[in-house]
Amino acid sequence: GLPGIIGQPLGPGVFRLGYGPVWDGFGDILTGVVRAIADDYGALVLIDHDAAARQIGIDLLDTAHAAGRDFRLAEGARV
């Protein structure tokens, strides 16, 4: 299964994601997911993955850096 993922706000626009011990490369996959989400929302973020500590640091630099992408979960539905 998937490990527990814990999000922790550290200050305005600064977050840390921690994850439990799992298979090699899980942190890299999670980092890629965070990057894809930031890209979809048009946010400019600095992402730092510390594999030894099993943590991903996220610094939100600009929430409106680029236009967000249109997302459709199902035909006719808009989110």
Image (spheres, grey):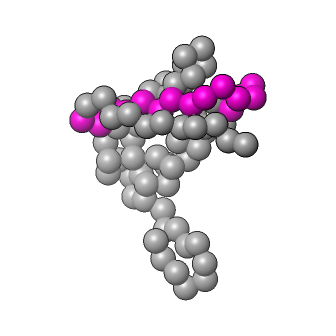
Residue occupying the point 48% across, 62% down: 69
**Residue 60: within the magenta?**
no
Q: Nearer the viewer, residue 14 or 7?
A: 7
Q: Nearer the viewer, residue 16 or 20?
A: 20
Residue occupying the point 43% across, 37% down: 7
Furthest-left residue in this view: 12
Residue occupying the point 75% across, 29% down: 23
- Residue 40, x across and y down, in percent: 49, 54
- Residue 29, x across and y down, in percent: 66, 36
- Residue 74, x across and y down, in percent: 60, 78
- Residue 12, located in which quarter of the rendered image? top left
Can residue 7 be seen at all in this image of the molecule? yes
- Residue 26, x across and y down, in percent: 68, 32
Image side of residue 55 versus residue 27, left or right: left
Image side of residue 28 versus residue 72, left or right: right
Q: Nearer the viewer, residue 27 or 19?
A: 19
Image side of residue 61 versus residue 49, left or right: left
**Residue 19: within the magenta?**
yes
Furthest-bottom residue in this view: 76
On screen, residue 68 above or below 60: below
Residue stretch in magenta:
12-26
